[in-house]
Image (cartoon, grey):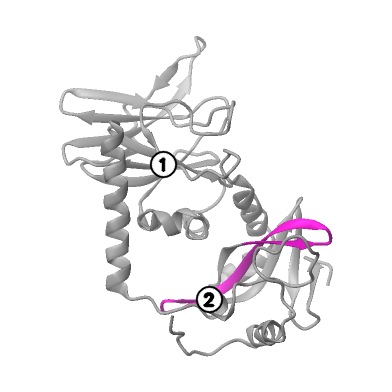
Amino acid sequence: MRLKKFFVPAIVLLLMLALLSGCASKPGDNTEDSSKPSPSGLSAILGSEVDPSAAAAEIDAQLSALHKEIDESGYQAGIAYIGFVNSKATEDELRIYLKSSQYAEKYSFLCDAPIVDAGGSELYAVVTTRADRSATVYPADINSSGKYNVHTDKALYKGKGADCFLLRCNVSELHSNVSVLFKTGDEQFSVNPMLSGKDGKLADIACYDFSIYSDDGGVQDDVMIAYGLLLETDEVKHYIDKGMTLQYTGQKQVIDGRQCWIFALGTEHGDQFVRELYYGVCDNLIYCYDAVSDTWDTLGAG
């Protein structure tokens, strides 16, 4: 994979020197404590060139493959639980999170999908596959009998044909606050996206579940929670306001005896993402990496 040449900020140069000196631990080596991040080689820092036509072909292939899975499942639509989100997160922040998640790699077409905001802390993706099918999102609530009241006079989104969109919803963990109506000709059915209190997976609804679950069966919400904590810090807010982007590196690191999720702040240079600052998050603690001293420091402690 060929690397593109461009200006590298001073802090990245220092980090590169630390890596080349053999001081950084290897990705996935979480058994030993360490005082520095473990980016996966020089290409992980500098990024790599992306052929736009190849990227578009990959997106089309991903969407076609998912459409095939949905159709072969016998369901009329697919829904995935993306994860827990900050209820106050902006659309830009939601997209930044999505681009840092596993979904950006496996279902990259979701990164540019429209976002339907019903209010809440759960993010879902909805996909339909047929030209003669529509998906409409309505607000909903629970009445005294424990049944859903669907406000069909206040549609939040009206989709048509083969479509995909993101849906932020669910203020409560006990019930959904939306109803998604799928209609094909005279046939129609509704679902209320939410998680099962039994196993943390998508509740039993009449749709194909294409959520990405962790090995133990639960959706990896820890990354999103950590991401939300970082977005609430003044330092990260400052850099994002300056045009930088926060991404999850896909790595974990042991810091002060704690297993932490590693994030990077960086800038976009064409098709490249240049990592400039590193953060570790665990147990409601946030660490920032000091490339000069080659140590992790608690954020706000100097």
Instruction: Give how far across and how far down residue 179 sits, in percent.
Output: 39, 28
Residue 69, disc:
none
Closer to the camera in the image, 66 or 289: 66
Name the residue beneath numbered marker 2.
Answer: 267
Which residue corresponds to the image point at 76% horizontal and 50% vertical from the top-left? 283
Residue 255 on the magenta span: yes
Name the residue beneath numbered marker 1.
Answer: 210
Q: Residues within 10 Å of mark 2 (few under 14, many from 20)?
A: some
Instruction: Give how far across and how far down residue 292 sits, in percent.
Output: 77, 83
Name the N-terminal-most of marks 1 and 2: 1
Instruction: Give how far across and how far down residue 290 sits, in percent.
Output: 76, 77
* Residue closest to the far top: 145
Classified by dominant secondary structure, the portion drawn in magenta counts as strand
The kind of residue tagged 1 is Phe
Closer to the camera in the image, 159 or 250: 250
* Mark 1, secondary structure of its residue: loop
Mark 1–mark 2 distance (CA, rounded to whole Å): 31 Å
Query: Which quadrant does the C terminus fall into?
Result: bottom right
- The answer to whether 19 is drawn above or below residue 82 in the figure is below
The kind of residue tagged 2 is Thr
Which residue corresponds to the image point at 39% horizontal and 38% vertical from the top-left? 79
Closer to the camera in the image, 49 or 119: 49
Closer to the camera in the image, 134 or 88: 134
Instruction: Give how far across and how far down residue 151 sits, in percent.
Output: 37, 25
Locate residue 74: give its quadrant.
top left
**Magenta segment, which residues?**
251-274
